[in-house]
Amino acid sequence: MNYSNHTYYAHSMHIYGSDREKLERDLLIRLGFNVCCPNRDLSLGNDMDAYLSIVKQCKSVVASEFAGFIGRGVYLEVSHALRHDIPVFVIRHSILYKVVKIVFFNENDWKTTYGQITEVESLKITA
């Protein structure tokens, strides 16, 4: 499948299948994004390189934080997109902000507090 017109929805496995995942995905669709949700649309198992290959094909990435942080998978997806000049946004209180910088926070916690989005541009997208 060609994902060149899709936006990759990078989010914590903690919210897979949850009401929050549905709300955020619905928000992105209302904003006009053609969403590629790894939980719903991809069956790649634990092959991170396969997910990063999809990220590289997408026109943008939208990240969701969990408790103010991003886990290792989201960190890798966001940093991969930024390295390849793919626009990245973060959802905060139903508003999208353009991501400028991410940093390591706790490299020992791969699930929750691995990284943090520390800088965003003032550009905001709302429904």
Image (cartoon, helix red, strand yellow):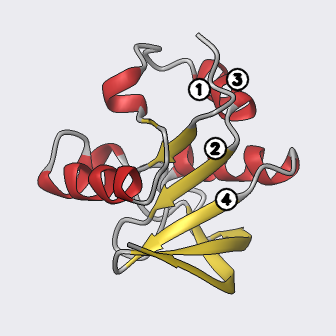
- Are circles 4 and 1 on residues that touch, CB within 8 Å? no
Circles 1 and 2 in contact, beta carbons < 8 Å: yes
The quadrant in which residue 17 appears is top left
x and y percent of residue 28 in the render? 40, 55
> Which of pointers 4 and 1 lies earlier in the amino acid sequence?
1
Q: Residue at x 67, y 59 (%)?
A: 88
Q: Along the line of sight, which residue is nearer the eye, 103 or 87?
A: 87
Residue at mark 2 to residue at mark 4: CA–CA distance: 10 Å
| Residue named by callout 1 | 51
Q: Please state which amino acid type lies under the numbered disc 1.
A: Tyr
Q: Is residue 16 left or right of residue 124?
A: left
Kindly check if marks 3 and 1 are in contact, taking CB atoms under 8 A apart as contact: yes
Q: Amino acid at mark 2?
A: Glu
| SS for callout 3 | helix
Choose mark 3 or mark 4, whichever is in front.
Answer: 4
The mark lying in front, picked from 2 and 4, is 4
Q: Identify whether 88 is placed above or below 99.
A: above
The Cα–Cα distance between marks 3 and 4, rounded to whole angstroms, is 16 Å
First in sequence, mark 3 or 4: give its number. Answer: 3
- Cα distance, mark 3 to mark 1? 5 Å
Task: Quadrant for residue 116, please give it.
Answer: bottom right
At label 3, which amino acid type do we have?
Answer: Ser
Q: Secondary structure at mark 4?
A: strand
Q: Label 4 is placed on what type of residue? A: Val
Residue 91 vs residue 29, the one in the foreground: 29
- At mark 2, the secondary structure is helix
- Determine which residue is flagged by label 4: 88
Q: Position of residue 45 (x, y in %)?
A: 43, 15
Determine which of the numbered discs, if any, sits on residue 77 in the image. Answer: 2
